[in-house]
Image: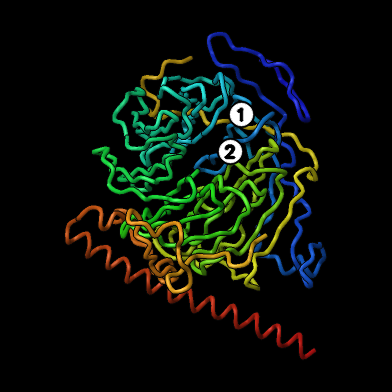
Amino acid sequence: MEWASFAYETGPFHSISGRPTIELDDAAIGLGVVVNTVGVCGNGDPQWSPECKSTMGDDPTLERHFRGHRDTVTSLSFHPTTKQLVSSSNDNSIMIWNFRQSVRAFRFEAHKDNVLDVSFSPSGNLVASASRDRSVRLWVPTVQGESAEFRAHSAAVRSVHFSPDGKELVTSSDDKSAKLWTVSHRKFVSTFSGHNHWVRCVRFSPEGRLIATCSDDKTVKLFDHKTAKCVHTFHELKGSPLHVEFHPTGTCIATGMTNNMIKVYDVRMLKLLQQYVCHEGPINKVAFHPCGNYLISASNDSSLKVMDLLEGRPIYTLEGHRGAITALTFTANGEYFASGGVDHQILVWKTNFDKEDLLKEFPRKAETKFGSSPNSDSPLVLNADGASPASDSGSSDIQEALNGEFHGLQVNGDRNGCGPVAEENEHLTDDSEENQDSNIVSTRNYFNRARVNVSGAQGDLQAYPVQRSIDNLCAQVEALTKTVTLMEQKISILENKLKNILTLKNL
């Protein structure tokens, strides 16, 4: 095996006999470097000043800058412990980036065409990759680069996702279907059919009972995991969904659309919950913060938008990529999120807008937490020049233990009016047909009320025992109590800020 270092291009690969090609690269650039984050202060012009910096304590900041891929970054996934980040690219490779300082990045090559999606298993012991070469590979993320390949579909495989327990894998393809597989023996289980065009994305719900797909046939479908039957179809009339993602509680889904819209659907009431028109280009990816109160979108317009689901509006616009942003993901604890794009770069951002002390006090997936409030109704624009960070090389120890999971493997800027559409304010021109219920439920109270355990997330789709309903109601009451406490804390913070402002004015 050879060591290779590079700035923009790597040296020749060294092939391991009988195994896919793997290379260790000095590809991690800017580890730990804080770049010149540009904020909006005073007259609204982008600038950097001590006064501006002091008002940005709760704003997202750019923490890492990785560069090593030779083509568009198509997907990102964090290790459950946040110590590693895996990326896939149209350069036919995946790379594992490490967050420790004296480490290097690992490049894995075996696919014969573009790698369109990649995902860490819930345990972090495996990585799954999906490719345009019609195959799926399961990788052991070690220096040896061991992997097992299976032909999953008869056309390009666009999406891959592990079940919450890590025992199964779901894939979607240009062959108009999604399929379920066992991980240990890569055995086919069932097919989720019904789409009549490419299936762009497929995702398990957090509790594993539902599977969501989105397709170029302008529909989003919900399937029962066990029976593989379609339980509901959301029809889109003006744009095609490019990505679908479940809320951490499993109670709703978000989709990114080709018509520049973001839609949030309630999977229990089967209604459109929120709709945002914030971008000036198609929405390639959406991702919920693990606390469930925020949503981030990535678009062809080179920007990321952070939506506050409680307020029902965008609060930040993040800029740093040159060209379309095609990949987006959060860490399991929500402390960081990463983005990748056609500029071949990966930017890792620190969230900051989610209060750390509140997150420590209450579980992320059970109750509502509040982030910091913006100072105006317009989103704050943060701009990070992707070329500015200083270079710093790195690489890492990769976890080797498999714990039985891989049994049977054979080694081989925001526009005016952007925000949710409320039933009293907007008329949905694209969802008013008979095949789509256009009555949009009120959203602020929906996200303000407490989150219940995901075991009861299906609601109207499936009846459950009375005892479970009682347990969920008790959980709601307890969570509502904590929510009131949080609101009181937030009011106190705002009161203190107001007092400080009045004191400064008097001076």
Q: Return the x and y of residue 146 as percentages of the image width and height.
A: 51, 19
Q: Return the x and y of residue 220 as percentages of the image width and height.
A: 39, 46
Q: Residue furthest bottom?
A: 506
In the rendered structure, the answer to whether residue 372 lies left or right of residue 274 reads: right
In the rendered structure, the answer to whether residue 192 lies left or right of residue 68 reads: left
Residue position for label 1 = 90
Is residue 169 visible in this depiction of the protein? no
Relative vertical location of residue 119 with respect to residue 262 in this rendering, above or below: above
Q: Quadrant of the C terminus?
A: bottom right
CA gap, disc 1 and disc 2: 17 Å
Picture residue at 52% right of the left edge, 43% below the top: 81
Q: Quadrant of residue 165?
A: top left
Q: Amino acid at mark 2?
A: Leu
Mark 1, residues whose alpha carbon is within 10 Å: few (<14), some, or many (≥20)?
A: many
Q: Amino acid at mark 1?
A: Asn
Relative vertical location of residue 14 with respect to residue 172 in this rendering, above or below: above
Residue position for label 2 = 85
Mark 1 or 2, which is nearer the eye?
Answer: 1
Q: Nearer the viewer, residue 43 or 27?
A: 43
**What is the number of the mark on residue 480?**
none
Compare marks 1 and 2 and give the one earlier in the sequence: 2
Mark 2, residues whose alpha carbon is within 10 Å: few (<14), some, or many (≥20)?
A: many
Q: Quadrant of residue 199?
A: top left
Q: Return the x and y of residue 493 as percentages of the image width and height.
A: 59, 77
Is residue 467 visible in this depiction of the protein? yes
Q: Return the x and y of residue 167 as percentages of the image width and height.
A: 35, 33
Picture residue at 58% right of the left edge, 63% below the top: 314
Query: Coloring scheme of the render?
Result: rainbow
Q: Quadrant of the N terminus?
A: top right
Q: Quadrant of residue 484?
A: bottom left
